[in-house]
Amino acid sequence: MTINVEKKDKYSIISIAGRLDASTSGEFEEQLVKKLDEGEVDIVINFADLDYISSSGLRVLLVGAKKIKAANKKMVLAGLKKHIYEVFEIAGFTPIFEIVDSIANL
Amino acid sequence: MTEKLKSESELSVVIATIQIEANKTYIPALTGFVSGIAEKFQLSREERIKLELITEEAALSIIENSFSKGQKGFYEVAVKYLPGKLKICFVDKGEPFDFEGHIDDNENIGAILIKAFADEISFNNLGKDGKEIIVTKKIPLQAFNSENIEQNSASKYEDVCNDDLVYQFMQPEQALEFTQFVFKNYEYNYPNDGVYYPEIRKELLEIGALDACVVLNKKNEIIGHIALKLNNPDSMVGELCEVIIDKKYRSNKICTAMKEFLFNYSMEMGLYGVYYNVCFLEKFQQNEAPLSESVEVAFLLFDNSLDNILYYKKLNNSPDLTIYPPLHHQNIVNQIYKRLNIKRIMLAADLKSLLLHLPQQTNLLLTISSETKTALIDIVEYGNDFIVKIKSLLGELTNNQILNVIIDLPLSNPVTQVNCAILEAEGFFFSGVLPEYQKTGDVLRLQYISGDIPKKTKAVISEFGSELLNYIYENAK
């Protein structure tokens, strides 16, 4: 998994590539929490290059959703591949997050 | 004759096993391992990702629950193949935990994902051997048709014609070579443990308690085997079993030729007929069935891909027995005998007087295979307690995870006419007729399935077989 963070307009965009699983979710959580703690801008997580997500990755997103809500900010998920979206749907995550097709649609 | 009752656990083939430390760090290695195998079975990329998810979530549940205190430990993962299925079996000896409660927890994301993407999930406590989680993923059927690991591809078949092969009776001195031959083809996965004891096999052959045909290639190596067994020394019907053919030779008609070899021998012995079963799984056998003049006499419905077809080949005329088939099955029973060209005198019983003179207790033989989750009840004699006894037995069996119950009713006993219908009211259904199968003579076979009746399979069977199978499914409903 690789994580790339960039700032664009009013968003901080975190792009994740590869696999978000039990062995990588810790690193992702660290980066996400760090960004959230800065608390300056809304967060966009770009999943366009993400190939795999398991419950460990979803749990991190849940932690992020709670934190961002408390900070009165917004977290948007972008570019979910079809099978990743299916995992979100099954886990009941689609109503929790704002999901857009790609970061171009922000 | 319980060898007919093959189930998934017997027929599955272990493809790979891995022992891995209970540590999240190694989960990607495990999912990659499983996914790599699944790729060989034509699972699409998306389906492989789902399989990886199931694997990860099951492994995580072990790491987080069985090794919750962070103690170092290992768990084992085995990938098993069945036609249309891959089974991933996780075994660990960590601390006991309630996996069923874990999987039923609707708040647990991992459990939700497993339930959504796995086709089957099961959990077994193995006592001192720990506990086992089994998750199953269906794979495309063509994966079996074209890439069954036992059959490999056609190009790998040995290019021989049957003229190059020698069919002969197995000799006692071939017992060790036979065991080596089984090992070469199945390692230690062949369902019947008896094939791994050459000294016992040698003795059985020496004393004439076992007859078998072996096929030798040009190098004088065993490349095929089939055995003929009798239910008891006085039995007038035999059963072909232990059909083993070298992986490289399965495109040839060796199976058919071996059967014909023992049919001829059995006919000379004066046997009335010979049974043999074909499991839908064993395609190398299925392609060659039905053999000429063999008739489908019974079907056992297991899982979709595991149904068993029981064939009977009449070899010699048998005495014209009197039988009492249940009136509502008389037509199909009649057709089976007609197809077999066996004469039977079918009578309607004077049941009132018969039922008054039944002994107190039913005499039955019960064979249970916990491994195959199947029980076979052979009714020797009816007693007044028959229904109470069967109901109680059925409850006990299903409570003990027995999923399939087969009951053989003696057709020579007039009470079968009544008791068949009573059993059907309890959920048993018609499965077939087996001439001369038991000491009591012909047998009416019924089957009980704990759970849903499996969907109909597309087996290679005769027109009559298809008619019989339709009848069985109609009754099963």
Image (cartoon, coloured by chain):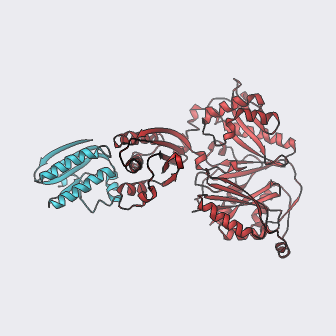
Rendered-image quadrant of the C terminus of chain B: bottom right
Q: Where does residue A38 sit, x and y in percent of width and height?
A: 12, 51
Of residue B113 and residue B337, the one placed in the foreground of this image is B113
Above or below residue A2? Residue B222 is: above
Residue at image location 62% in from the left, 31% down from the top: B184
Q: Could you tell me which residue is drawn at 49 percent across and 54 percent down?
A: B120
* Image position of B9 (left or right of B385): left
Residue B138 in view in this figure: no
- From the viewer's perspective, is residue B184 above or below residue B469? above
Does residue A19 appear to the left or right of B124 in the view shown?
left
Residue B384 position by quadrant: bottom right
Residue B56 on image: x %, y %: 39, 47
* Residue A75 visible to an observer of this rendering: yes
Residue B192 lies, in percent from the top left, at 67, 42
**Count of all numbered marks drawn on residues in the image:** 0
Query: What shade does chain A have?
Result: cyan
Q: Residue at x 82, y 66 (%)?
A: B324
Spot occupied by residue A77 in the image (x, y as percentages of width and height):
23, 54
Hue used for the chain lettered B: red
Q: In the figure, B207 relative to B438: above or below?
A: above
Q: For this rendering, which residue is in front, B385 or B379?
A: B385
Quarter of the image for residue B409 reads: bottom right
- Which residue is most to the bottom? B352
Q: Residue furthest right?
A: B319
Q: Is residue B236 above or below residue B454?
A: above
